[in-house]
Image (spheres, rainbow, N blue to C red):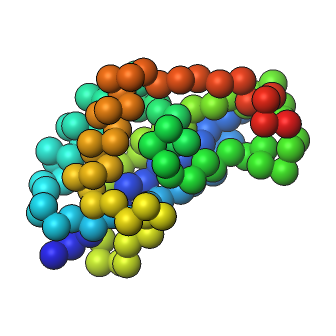
Amino acid sequence: MSNIKFNYLYRDGSNYKSWGEVIFSNPENLDVKKVEEKLLDAFLPDKQFIASQISIPEKFLFADGDFTEHDHCYHEYDCIEISEEECTDALKRSIGDFLQDIEATSKQGWKAFDILERA
């Protein structure tokens, strides 16, 4: 059984990027194309989401506190892929569990926040 790697990024208004990935188990043997369809249906336009709402690490460029006018709260989905690497999800979720979390969050609404509150 292969795992599934979720690749995402934070891209500021100047197009500087910080990449992240989380690897999930796949005991349900879900098809990558179907998983991607469900992800895209649940995310905001332009494949955006709020990382903290789905319990994955935030990849902000301003983590050291140096905020700019180009910073915002959204992360962006890049792709998923089959992976033989070990699972890295802090909550030990399967990809099916992760999809359920994303779909539930999408139904409740993605809650934007002011990044200056993090200063």
> Is 17 drawn above or below residue 46 in the view shown?
below
Residue pictured at 29% horizontal, 34% vertical? 103
- Of residue 105 and residue 57, the one placed in the foreground of this image is 105
Quadrant for the C terminus in the image: top right
The number of numbered discs placed on residues in the rendered structure image is 0
Q: Is residue 35 visible?
A: yes
Please give the name of the residue rendered at 67% of the width and 35% of the height, measured from the top-left corner.
12
- Left or right placement of residue 34 versus residue 72 in this view: left
Out of 67 and 88, give the one closest to the viewer: 88
The percent position of residue 64, horizontal first and vertical second, equals 84, 50
Is 53 placed above or below 89 here? Answer: above
Give the percent coordinates (x, y) of residue 101.
Answer: 34, 42
The x, y position of residue 21, in whole percent, is 47, 59
| Residue 71 location, quadrant | top right
Q: In terms of image quadrants, where is residue 36?
A: top left
The x and y percentages for residue 113 are 65, 24
Q: Work out whether residue 74 or residue 53 is closer to the camera in this orientation and state it.
A: 53
Please give left or right for residue 75 compared with residue 98 in the image.
Answer: right
Note whether 82 is above or below 104 in the view shown: below
Tell me what residue is drawn at x 16 percent, y 47 percent: 33
49 in relation to 5, above or below: above
In the rendered image, the quadrant that contains the N terminus is bottom left
Note whether residue 40 is visible: no
**What residue appears at the point 12 percent right and 63 percent down from the top-left corner?**
29
